[in-house]
Amino acid sequence: MTRFLCIIPLVLITSAASAQQQGQDVCARDASRFCRAHLDGGDQVVLICLKQNRARLSKACQALLTRHGQ
């Protein structure tokens, strides 16, 4: 029983990391397409660039930004 209880946090951490990675993958193509010059500037710079190009982004990336309050 103790082993089972120790595994639960590991599963939760792994699933959260997987969801975050899927989110990054959704906008990766758009970021490389519209924000290539800003990719080395960090996440916030890329986010600003994506928001500036919102009308040109894929529907999935637009939805992800909306879900995260951007």
Image (tube, rainbow, N blue to C red):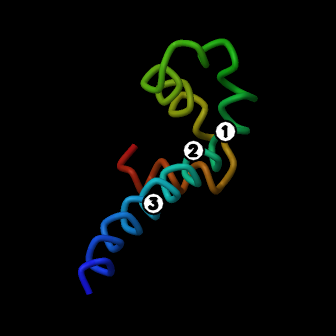
Q: Which residue is mark 3?
A: 14
Give coordinates of residue 40: x percent, y percent.
58, 13
At numbered mark 1, what does the secondary structure look like: helix, strand or loop? helix
Measured in 3D between alpha carbons, the distance from the residue under mark 1 to the one under mark 3, in whole angstroms, is 21 Å
Q: Residues within 10 Å of mark 1 (few under 14, many from 20)?
A: few
Identity, as a three-letter code, of the amino acid under mark 3: Thr
Q: Is residue 65 left or right of residue 61?
A: left
Q: Which residue is mark 1?
A: 28
Give coordinates of residue 1: x percent, y percent.
26, 87
Q: Sequence order check: which comes first, mark 2 or mark 3? A: 3
Which residue occupies the foreground of this view, 70 or 39?
Answer: 39
Q: Sequence order check: which comes first, mark 1 or mark 3? A: 3
Identity, as a three-letter code, of the amino acid under mark 1: Ala
Label placed on residue 24? 2
Up the image or down, 12 lies above or below 52; here it is below
Q: Which quadrant of the view contains residue 14?
A: bottom left
Residue at 46 percent across and 64 percent down: it is: 15
Residue at 61 percent across and 19 percent down: it is: 39
Which residue occupies the foreground of this view, 10 or 26?
Answer: 10
Give coordinates of residue 8: x percent, y percent.
33, 74
Up the image or down, 7 lies above or below 19; here it is below
Identity, as a three-letter code, of the amino acid under mark 2: Gln
Mark 2 vs 3: CB contact within 8 A: no
At numbered mark 2, what does the secondary structure look like: helix, strand or loop? helix
Mark 2 vs mark 3: give the one in front: 3
Residue at 66 percent across and 12 percent down: it is: 37
Mark 1 vs 2: CB contact within 8 A: yes
